[in-house]
Image (cartoon, rainbow, N blue to C red):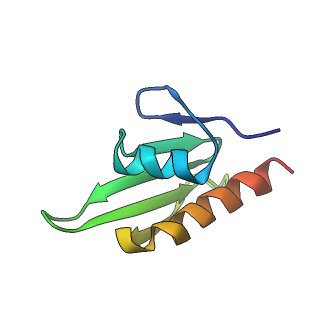
Amino acid sequence: MMAQLFNKNGLEVKNNLKAIQDELIRGTGFVMGEKISAFMERESLHEKHIVVSVDEGNGVPTEKRFVVGRMNEALELFQRVLSDQTQ
């Protein structure tokens, strides 16, 4: 079963790389699924990061930051965690 994803407004986001990337870049800047989220974080006027946050059940989510140029790595991590959860 494919994991359901939502944006910041609670609207469904398709579970594929292009849809997730579009939502992060051109949409609300936020995608979440069960125990995982990815969002854009503006560090400064010209510097943005993609933050992937994983809830591993110990109360404190693990966050990994990627510069926007490493979007593919962030998306791969996001999808890998999602697919691990559905197995």
- The reply to whether residue 61 is visible in this rendering is no
**Residue at (38, 73) in percent of width and height:** 69
- The reply to whether residue 25 is visible in this rendering is yes
Foreground: 32 or 1?
Answer: 1
Foreground: 82 or 73?
Answer: 73
Whether residue 43 sits left or right of residue 80 in the image: it is left
Q: Quadrant of the N terminus?
A: top right
Query: Residue lying farthest right?
Result: 87
Q: Give the percent coordinates (x, y) of residue 45.
A: 12, 62
Whether residue 57 sits left or right of residue 68 in the image: it is right
Foreground: 21 or 33?
Answer: 21
Q: Give the percent coordinates (x, y) of residue 9.
A: 41, 27
**Residue at (60, 37) in percent of width and height:** 14
**Residue at (22, 64) in percent of width and height:** 43
Q: Give the percent coordinates (x, y) of residue 49.
A: 34, 65
Query: Residue lying farthest left?
Result: 45
Q: Give the percent coordinates (x, y) of residue 34.
A: 65, 41
Identify whether 78 is placed above or below 24. Answer: below
